[in-house]
Amino acid sequence: MQQNEEDLMVGEDAGSEYDGPSKSQVKRDMLALQALGEELAGQSLERLRSLDLPEKLMDAFVHVKSIKAHGAVRRQLQFIGKLMRTVDPAPLRLQLDIWAGHSREGVARQHQAEHWRERLIEQDEALTGFLSEFPEADIPALRQIIRNARKEKEEGKPPKHFRELYRALLTLIESRYRAETSEDD
């Protein structure tokens, strides 16, 4: 009888010592990482490259874009979820929110790009002001996009170059923001 009481005490002690997450919590965390990975997989490769992800994870994102079969995509996304366990998800979530325009800073940068786009299309001298603020811009490419956007507007064509100008400006503004925030760290 004495041995049974000791066995019971060991069993009680063993159960009360573990303070880690439950199986359910671990599963929720893994599913959240997989969902984050799926969101990231929906982004362009250019955006993913700007995140400075581990090489193996970046390769998995490149590979999932080339897969056509639904079942294979699902398995690759599960693999991405597994690889996501090695990275800090907070900065990735923040960047996704910025790209989606959910943060004030992201919305402000989008408004800044829209403002510059309007000025560059309407005023010839606006390019000088833009280049003084963003000297790293590719001047010939920017001039060509502006010319095409103006011509498009005059001819009443669909706004292909208008959008391209916005994307180019937003890319410059966001790269400046990333450079400034990395200096602060």
Image: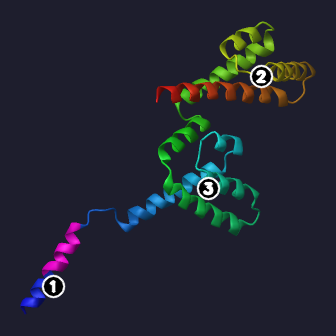
Residue at image point 75% right, 9% down: 128
Disc on the earlier residue, 1 or 2: 1
Kindly identify which residue carries mark 2: 138
Hey, what amino acid is under mark 1?
Asp
Helix, strand or loop at label 1? It is helix
Task: Pick out the residue farthest to the left.
Answer: 2
Amino acid type at image mark 3: Lys
Q: Is residue 138 shown left or right of residue 24? A: right
Q: Position of residue 8 (x, y in %)?
A: 15, 83
Q: Mark 1 sits on what residue?
A: 7
In the image: residue 119, left or right of residue 178: right
x and y percent of residue 16 in the render? 20, 69
Depth-wise, is mark 3 or mark 1 nearer the camera?
3
Q: Main secondary structure of the magenta part?
A: helix
Which picture quadrant has residue 5? bottom left
View extreme (bottom): residue: 1
Side of 119 relative to 145 (left or right): left
- Position above or below: 2 against 182: below
Q: Which residues are magenta?
A: 9-17
CA distance separating discs 3 and 1: 47 Å
Q: Is residue 49 visible?
A: yes
Give the camera-side residue of 21 and 60: 60
| Mark 3 vs mark 2, CA separation in Å | 32 Å
Q: Position of residue 142 (x, y in %)?
A: 80, 21
Q: Which mark is residue 56?
A: 3
Q: Which mark is residue 26?
A: none
Q: Are marks 1 and 2 in contact (CB under 8 Å)?
A: no
The total number of labels drawn is 3
Q: Nearer the viewer, mark 3 or mark 2?
A: 3
Name which residue lies at 38% across and 68% down: 23
